[in-house]
Image (tube, grey):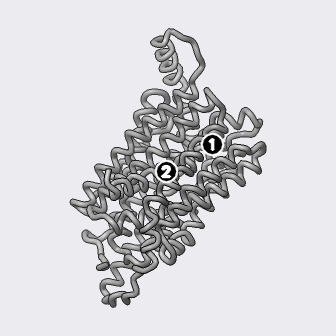
């Protein structure tokens, strides 16, 4: 494998780890800690909220440091820092301690999106497909959080789910630093000092309009993404018990053994949904390069609207299939806003602009956790599905006002 491919692979693994670390606690809270510590699921969510705020708010300073200092240097900090924070979190013995650990994970996790995506959109062409491939790795991290943590709960305890990825990330950080050491040093001598090209009044008008749509849909789609990825293990734990028991009995029958591995089965079902839904990003990435964002975004938003509307009251196999449908839409929308920013943002400030985008996205992600807890405690998940259908409708209306062709800034 040449250095260029190794570079892209490490960036993709970084995206995988970023989302894995941020969602380990979602499965731990849903399947283990509420029993072990005697705290309700809704109460546990409060301790994850500061970490998700950090995941958003620290994106902007991370992007600023990357533009001013070194993007590859910041990626090295990401790998080593988030791995160390995860290992420290594994030693938590109280909700407050685990909340502090999750906050530290959020601070280092905030580095990836503004910095990694700035690198991907500047270094390689066929932007839509590259972003989509990178996004698939991130979604596999989401999926693996449920699968690996569910397995650890059944076979080794939840603490190991924080330790093993932490060690792996630290090792990758040193590998990344070794691969990109010359690039880190060279970045200081190639910072662009060219003045920005003047903008016409008509260009500014279109740019402001598209930017407003990008940030509105970023905020609303973050509600959908957080609600589905964070709460899906709990949704499946409640709604797929019959299916999980049937699958557990089938697996144990094949193995000619007895066991109670329902948590592993629930985690596996969540992994399957996340992994299959990730394929939607590759399709969307290809379509973005061919047709642009407007038509693609409208199709994806329509999928979410339909499947969220169908979900209330469903259980077991039908619920599983409908969940797969709305996750295809939820994951399919992920590369679209990043594609639009990559086309519109100027190179020297690109990491900072991505930083602003992710401050919006992940601040909303954090604020969504209390929403999930509030709605779940009072009305259950059926009401949450209806709220998400409404959010998809807002996205659909906003995207319908996008211009057919995006304004672009020459590098």
Question: Which quadrant of the figure contains the C terminus?
Answer: bottom left
117 to the left or right of 60: left
Q: Is residue 110 left or right of residue 129?
A: right
Residue 387, visible in the rendered structure: no
Query: Could you classify mark 2 by the number of other residues whose Cα lies within 10 Å: few (under 14), some (14-19), or many (20 or more)?
Result: many
Specify which label sits upstream in the sequence, 1 or 2: 1
Name the residue nearer the viewer: 234 or 170: 170
Residue displayed at 54% across by 46% down: 168
Q: Residue at x 25, y 71 (%)?
A: 405
Residue at the spot x=69%, y=49% of the render? Answer: 88
Query: 367 or 190: which is nearer to us?
Result: 190
Q: What percent of the width, then of the height, locates residue 126?
A: 26, 61
- Considering every residue shown, the one lying at the far left of the view is 290
Please, what secondary structure does the residue beneath circle 1 have? helix
Could you say which disc has been placed on residue 92 in the image?
Answer: none
Residue at 78% across, 44% down = 94
Q: Residue 312 appears at what percent x and percent y?
A: 49, 38
Residue for badge 1: 163
- Locate residue 359, reporting x and y percent: 54, 67
CA separation, marks 1 and 2? 34 Å
Q: Which residue is mark 2?
A: 388
Q: Residue 129 occupies which quadrant of the picture?
A: bottom left
**Residue 18 appearing in the image:** yes
Front residue of this view, candidates 360 and 254? 254
The correct choice, above or below, for 392 with respect to 26 in the image is below
Horizontal and vertical percent position of residue 79: 54, 56
Q: Residues within 10 Å of mark 1 (few under 14, many from 20)?
A: some
Secondary structure beneath label 2: helix
Residue depth check, mark 1 versus mark 2: number of the one nearer the observer: 1
């Amino acid at each position: 494998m040449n250095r260029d491919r190794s570079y892209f692979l490490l960036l993709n693994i970084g995206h995988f780890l970023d989302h894995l670390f941020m969602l380990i606690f979602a499965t731990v809270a849903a399947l283990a800690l509420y029993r072990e510590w005697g705290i309700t699921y809704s109460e546990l969510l409060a301790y994850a909220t500061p970490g998700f705020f950090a995941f958003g708010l620290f994106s902007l300073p991370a992007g600023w440091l990357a533009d001013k200092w070194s993007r590859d240097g910041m990626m090295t900090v990401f790998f080593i820092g988030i791995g160390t924070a995860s290992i420290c979190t594994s030693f938590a013995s109280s909700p407050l301690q685990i909340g502090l650990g999750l906050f530290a994970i959020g601070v280092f996790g905030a580095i990836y999106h503004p910095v990694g995506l700035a690198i991907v959109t500047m270094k390689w062409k066929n932007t839509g497909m590259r972003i989509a491939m990178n996004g698939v790795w991130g979604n596999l991290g989401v999926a693996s959080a449920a699968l690996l943590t569910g397995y650890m709960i059944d076979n080794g305890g939840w603490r190991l789910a924080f330790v093993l990825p932490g060690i792996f990330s630290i090792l990758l950080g040193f590998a990344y630093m070794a691969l990109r050491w010359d690039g880190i040093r060279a970045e200081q001598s190639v910072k662009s000092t060219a003045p920005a090209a003047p903008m016409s009044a008509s260009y500014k008008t279109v740019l402001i309009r598209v930017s407003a749509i990008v940030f509105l849909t970023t905020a609303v789609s973050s509600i959908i993404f957080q609600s589905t990825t964070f709460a899906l293990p709990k949704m499946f734990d409640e709604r797929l018990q019959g299916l999980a028991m049937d699958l557990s009995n089938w697996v144990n029958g094949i193995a000619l053994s007895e066991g109670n591995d329902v948590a592993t089965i629930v985690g596996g079902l969540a992994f399957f949904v996340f992994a299959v839904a990730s394929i939607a990003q590759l399709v969307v990435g290809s379509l973005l390069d061919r047709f642009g964002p407007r038509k693609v975004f409208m199709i994806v938003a329509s999928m979410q609207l339909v499947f969220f509307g169908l979900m209330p009251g469903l259980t077991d196999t039908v619920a599983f299939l409908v969940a797969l449908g709305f996750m295809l839409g939820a994951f399919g929308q992920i590369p679209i806003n990043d594609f639009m920013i990559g086309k519109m943002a100027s190179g020297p400030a690109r990491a900072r602009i991505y930083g602003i985008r992710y401050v919006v996205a992940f601040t909303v992600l954090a604020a969504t956790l209390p929403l999930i807890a509030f709605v779940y405690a009072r009305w259950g998940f059926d009401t949450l599905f209806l709220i998400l259908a409404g959010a998809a409708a807002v996205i659909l209306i906003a995207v319908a006002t996008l211009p057919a062709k995006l304004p672009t800034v020459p590098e």
